[in-house]
Image (spheres, rainbow, N blue to C red):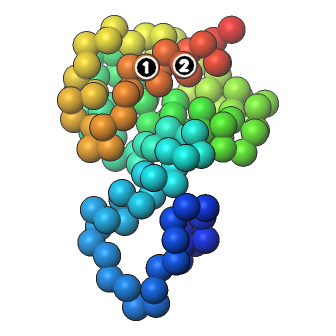
Amino acid sequence: MHIAKQKGCGKIPPKARFTQQEIIHKAQKIMGASGIIPCTACRYCTKGCPQQIPIPDIFASMNKRIGSGQLDESQADYDKLTASGISASSCIECGQCENVCPQHISIIDNLKECSRTFEK
């Protein structure tokens, strides 16, 4: 019921039954309002990525930075994650990831933002 306490979500009546899709839409609304990337780490995007970019992990680093202001920690996470040389800027903008994303995230644009943020 933590979702019900978020601003703009309204009260959820006790014993309310929601479909999985309704719950996902409510969570997306909340996450969108907070500015974080609404990635659920399903990893559909990584399976077809020709560059093998760990997209959900990169987004998790960015969300740590945006969501809780953990600047040093998020940078350290990103640096460790990309130590092999595969980073957000490795994206060739093929769009395969965006075609399979169930959250309809603008993955390419978000990877560009992650690159600008972490790869200074």
Quarter of image, res 101: top left
Give the x, y percent position of residue 11: 52, 77
Give the residue drawn at x 71%, y 28%: 76
Q: Is residue 32 left or right of residue 21?
A: right
Give the residue drawn at x 37%, y 85%: 16
Q: Are marks 1 and 2 in contact (CB under 8 Å)?
A: yes
In-front residue for pair 89/14: 14
In-front residue for pair 47/93: 93
Give the x, y percent position of residue 59: 51, 34
Instruction: Give the amino acid type for the residue marked by disc 2 in the picture.
Output: Glu
Q: Is residue 11 above or below residue 54?
A: below
Give the residue drawn at x 27%, y 28%: 98
- The residue wearing badge 2 is 113
Instruction: Give the amino acid type for the residue marked by disc 1 in the picture.
Output: Asp
- The residue wearing badge 1 is 109
- Secondary element under disc 1, as helix, strand or loop, is helix
Numbered-mark total: 2
How packed mark 2 is, by other alpha carbons closer than 10 Å (few <14, some 14-19, many 20 or more), is some
